[in-house]
Image (tube, rainbow, N blue to C red):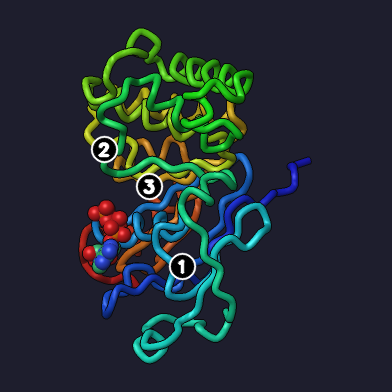
Amino acid sequence: MAEPRENVLHVENVTMQFGGVVAVNNLSLDVDKGEIVALIGPNGAGKTTAFNVITGVYQPTNGRVQFQGDTIIENHPRGKMRKNYLGENAELYSNSIVRTPDCITKLGIARTFQNIRLFKAMTVFENVLIATHMRSEANVFSATFGLNRREEMTNRELAMELIEMVGLKDEADVLATSLPYGKQRRLEIARALATKPSLLLLDEPAAGMNPQETDDLADFICRIKAAFHLSVFVIEHHMDLIMSISDRIYVLNFGKLIAQGTPEEIQNNQIVIDAYLGTGKTN
Ligand SMILES: Nc1ncnc2c1ncn2[C@@H]1O[C@H](COP(=O)(O)OP(=O)(O)OP(=O)(O)O)[C@@H](O)[C@H]1O
C-alpha cells in the first residue's frame, strides 16, 4: 500500500506585484515529503520571485505559504496596493505574517542561489561551518571565546562530513572562490545542508555546468535527498536534468501556473511546448 502523502510546502494564491509588474500571479502549489518537485518556465516567468517569497526575501502582495502545516507567511493587498492589485483572491487573507530569511532557514527551509553567493574571503570549511551555526546554540561569538565547546566540535564534524559528502575533502582549506564553478555549486549545496533543512530549494543548480557535471549533479541531488531525508524544490532550465530527477513539475509562464504533472505529462503538454516555443498560446 502506498504511504500517505505528507505535505511539506503549501503555497496558496501567492501573488507578487512590483508596481504594475505581476511577477507571480495567484500561484498555488505543493511539495510533499520525500519528493523532488521542479518549477520550470521561460526566462522572466517568475520562478526566482516565487522562491524569494517562500524564503522571506519578499513579502507577497497576497497569499499564504505554509511549511509543515504551519502558516509561515501571509499577506493581503493593503494601502495603496489595495487599489492597484492586479491578482485574484485578495479577499481570502486578512493576516499579515512576515518572517525574515534567516528565521525561515531556522524553521528548516534552505536554498541556493542562481548567482552563487559564497563568502569570498573564507575557505571551503569556513563557509560550511558558519552555516552550521544557523541551527545551533553556538555562534561565531561563542565559538571565538570557546563557549559551547561541545556543540562547536559537533558543528565542525558536521561541516567536515558535508564537505566529504560533496567531494571537496581535499579542498577544505582552500578559498571558496578559487574552486572551479561546478565545485562552488556543490559547496553552496553543502552550506545549505549544514543548516539541517527538511526542504531544500535549488535555484538553477546546473547553471554553467557541462553535460558531464550536469549528469553528476542529477545523481548527487538524488543521493543527498535520500541521505538527509529531504524534500527538494528545484528551478532549472536543463530539461534533461529536470525530466530525470523530478517526481512532479509545475510550469510557470508570465507569473501564472500553466501546467503541472509528471515529467511525461509535461513533456507532452501542448500548452507547455507552445510557451517554450514562444507562440504565446498559454490559455
Ligand atoms: N525586485 C524586482 N523589482 C521589479 N521587478 C522584478 C523584481 N524581481 C523580479 N522582477 C520582475 O519579475 C519578473 C519575474 O522575474 P524572475 O526573476 O522571478 O523570473 P525567472 O522565471 O526566475 O527568470 P529566469 O529564468 O530568467 O531567472 C520579471 O519580469 C522581472 O523583471
Dot 1 corresponds to which residue?
A: 27
Secondary element under disc 1, as helix, strand or loop, is strand
Q: In this view of the protein, which residue sits in the foreground, 152 or 258? A: 152
2 or 3: tag closer to the N-terminus: 2
Task: Give the alpha-carbon distance from disc 3 to disc 1, as whole Å.
Answer: 15 Å
In the picture of the structure, the residue carrying the numbered disc 2 is 207
Asked if ligand 1 lies within 8 A of label 3, the reply is: yes
Name the residue rendered at 30%, 68% in the picture. 254
Q: Is residue 126 left or right of residue 68?
A: left
Judged left or right of residue 118, residue 264 is right
Quadrant in which residue 211 is drawn: top left
Is residue 275 shown to the viewer in this render?
no
- For residue 235, the mark is 3
Question: For the residue labelled by badge 2, is the local secondary structure a helix, a strand or a loop?
Answer: loop
Q: Are marks 3 and 1 in contact (CB under 8 Å)?
A: no
Q: Where is residue 63 in the image (x, y as percent from the top left)?
A: 51, 72
Q: What is the secondary structure assignment of the residue under circle 3?
A: strand
**Residue 191, percent across and down?**
43, 30
Residue toward you, 278 or 149: 149
